[in-house]
Amino acid sequence: MASLVLASASPRRLELLRCIGIEPAYVAPMAIDEKPHARELPRHLAARLAGEKCAAAAECFPDSYVLAADTVVACGRRVLGKARDVEEARRFLTMLSGRRHRVWGGLAIRSPDGRRASRTVMTHVSFKRLETREIEDYLASSEWRDKAGAYGIQGRAGGFVKAITGSYPNVVGLALYETRSLLVGLGYPAP
């Protein structure tokens, strides 16, 4: 049986895969340029980044299944990446306060025989109106670090979410239904 390679450094993606009984043989993050192209829509950015990570990992692991994913938080057409510092995180949270935004999850999988499958998953997330104190307390927790949009729904920021439409695990970092479906469709023996 061919092994599975997770082309991601995200501990959340690994945890999510384990939740559905899938244990990658290797975790191999791929270093690619994640900067959006000029006028690139958030949906296309998520798909492109997942595809580029998958292609890079497939070169290193040609006899394995390769799974790559990327998460893009978007407020309108504006991409809210991983905040570089506390000031940018504050701007992101202020922008999301009292609004609905989209979380795009890009998935790309390559099988050992070279077949490819990909999907883009969108989830709507609505935040309550945040008080200044709530934003400052969240920033002090440091949970915003290394998270698209400067928040993690699976942590304290879950208390900011009024409503969610779509895949919750997509917001955490990996749409599980779609991931499992694509893997099975390419012949991976998922439980």
Image (cartoon, rainbow, N blue to C red):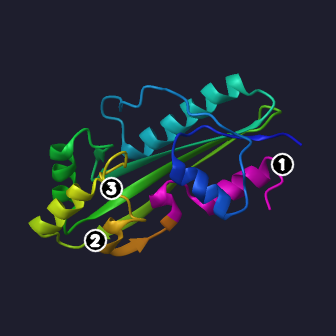
Q: Are marks 1 and 2 in contact (CB under 8 Å)?
A: no
- Residue 111 place in picture, x, y as percent: 77, 38
Is residue 128 positioned above or below 124 on the image?
A: below
Q: Dot 3, how many residues are within 10 Å of its Cα: few (below 14), some (14-19), or many (20+)? A: some
Q: In the rendered image, which residue does mark 2 sit on?
A: 160
Element type at mark 1? loop
The answer for how far apart the CA atoms under marks 2 and 3 are is: 13 Å
Query: Disc 3 marks which amino acid?
Result: Glu
Instruction: Single out the mark in the foreground, 1 or 2.
Output: 2
Q: Which residues are magenta?
A: 169-191
Q: Earlier in the sequence, mark 2 or mark 3?
A: 3
Q: In the rendered image, which residue does mark 3 sit on?
A: 143
- In the displayed structure image, the side of residue 40 where residue 84 appears, left or right: left
Quarter of the figure with residue 75: bottom left
Which residue occupies the foreground of this view, 64 or 52? 64
Kindly identify the residue that appears in the image at 42 percent across and 26 percent down: 33
Element type at mark 2? helix
The answer for how far apart the CA atoms under marks 3 and 1 are is: 37 Å
Query: Disc 2 marks which amino acid?
Result: Phe
Quarter of the figure with residue 57: top right
Q: Dot 2, how many residues are within 10 Å of its Cα: few (below 14), some (14-19), or many (20+)? A: many
Q: Earlier in the sequence, mark 3 or mark 1?
A: 3
- In the displayed structure image, the side of residue 86 where residue 9 appears, left or right: right
